Image (cartoon, rainbow, N blue to C red):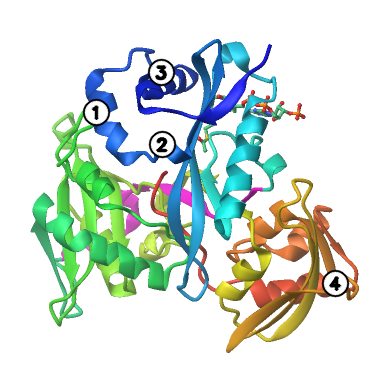
Amino acid sequence: MSHEVRTVTESEFPDWLRARRIAFLQPPVVPDEEVAQRLPYVDLRRTRGVFDGGRCVATLRSFAQRLTVPGGARIGASAVTNVSVLPTHRRRGLLSRLMAAELAEAKERGDAVSTLVAAEYPIYGRYGYGPATWITEWTVDVRRAGLDPRWAGPDDGGRVDLVEAADVRAFGPGLHDRLGAVRHGVVDRDRRAWEIGTGAVVLPGRPWTEPLYATYRSAAGEVEGYVCYTTDDTWEDKQPLCSATVRDLIAVTPAAERALWHFVCSHDWTTTVKSGHRAPDDLLPLLLPDPRAARVTTHADLVWLRILDVVRALETRTYAASGALVLELADPAGLAGGRYRLDASPQGASCVPTTASADLSMDVAALGTLYLGDESAVRLAALGRVEEGRPGAAAAADALLRTSRRPWCPDMF
Ligand SMILES: CC(=O)SCCNC(=O)CCNC(=O)[C@H](O)C(C)(C)COP(=O)(O)OP(=O)(O)OC[C@H]1O[C@@H](n2cnc3c(N)ncnc32)[C@H](O)[C@@H]1OP(=O)(O)O
């Protein structure tokens, strides 16, 4: 039976959404309202389906994204999302065909990398993606944390204020942009995401609970961070057992990060704080007098990265040390493989194809994992995923590639 892989037309979009809903285990009915809300925000030229007898049985779409890399520059990415195959058509190679079409087009367009958030870990390594950023979620037992119950706000001249959703929509995009300068792994958050995150747009099937918003302003009066969180009001035996759940917390200075966590952990009645998805090296646990009061409740990969243009990717990021490295990259898809020499220093980097013998050999997916500096080449060598052509080359790669703070992406896409 032949299955056609192609972009979808506007009139096919509801059927495309239906296929996606079924594969994502959601009710198969697509309300007209959902079609009307989503259609303006998808690029149908980058929205693919697989068709069987005129019905859509598999979906994948991509969109233009910018990803911050070590040093704060933004690199062009093709972000892949809405990947699905109907249960009636699974394991016949449809995802592989969709991915091949998507990656070839992204390469042709000149995107340096491709990104995605994987539903399940084993799916995307075969297509050259490696996990590049991780998230951690903590649940804080506030009574054990040891915070001073007399805390009345930051003592550094800054202040915390409750603000309105409209304020967040006004300062949020600028604040998020500034985050990219201090944290690599950040991707664009567009205006619509701010509208959804602040209740200005409510998506069908996603009930909205109004949260609270608070800002941290520096002594100079500048907004350096904000938190969006919900609270509940649970009591047992005349004792408050209330919780606060953070939906979003963006801080561009350590003072803002410390103050906003302290604020959320210092609400009267509140005995539990759920942090939401944070950077694995977020300040939260260590700013508590007793860090063990913050229990890790989730720790997982988030952004998977697939290098398409090795030269541009390696020349766009910065390096804390100086050195040269010859990398042999295997890429069965034929998109980024080859041998490259990287000459890096804190002043800049150059990367060129070479015929010199390789210091390190790896699959392109391993470079995706190393690229943002979160993983160790020595560790991947110990796992057999990186091979040393020169003893000590993996440690030399770590000295160049690793970063002092870990990459983090606060957004799902
Ligand atoms: C970025 C995102 O959108 S993430 C969301 C991904 N979507 C989902 O998880 C929804 C539910 N699952 C699905 O829709 C499908 O099962 C998909 C999309 C994950 C896979 O689609 P399929 O068409 O079945 O994949 P396809 O047949 O091309 O498989 C290619 C290879 O990947 C393997 N594979 C596919 N899915 C999985 C999986 N979930 N776990 C492990 N291996 C997998 C296949 O076994 C096959 O291996 P092989 O080449 O060694 O034989």
Vertical comparison of 372 with 155: above or below: above
Q: Which mark is residue 44?
A: 2
Q: Which mark is residue 15?
A: 3
Q: What residue does disc 4 label?
A: 359
Question: How far apart are labels 1 and 3 at the CA level?
Answer: 14 Å
State which quarter of the image contains the C terminus: top left
Vertical comparison of 155 with 173: above or below: below
Residue at x-position 38% and y-position 60%: 284
Quadrant of the rendered structure where residue 149 is? bottom left
Mark 1 Cβ and ligand 1 under 8 Å apart: no
Under circle 4, the secondary element is loop
Question: Counting residues from the N terminus, which is met first, the one under dot 1 or under dot 3?
Answer: 3
Crowding at mark 4 (Cα within 10 Å: few <14, some 14-19, many 20+) = many
Under circle 3, the secondary element is helix
Question: How far apart are labels 3 and 4 at the CA level?
Answer: 50 Å
Question: Counting residues from the N terminus, which is met first, the one under dot 4 or under dot 2?
Answer: 2
Residue 44: percent from the left, percent from the top? Answer: 41, 36
> Can see residue 58?
yes
Would you say 299 lies left or right of 162 here?
right
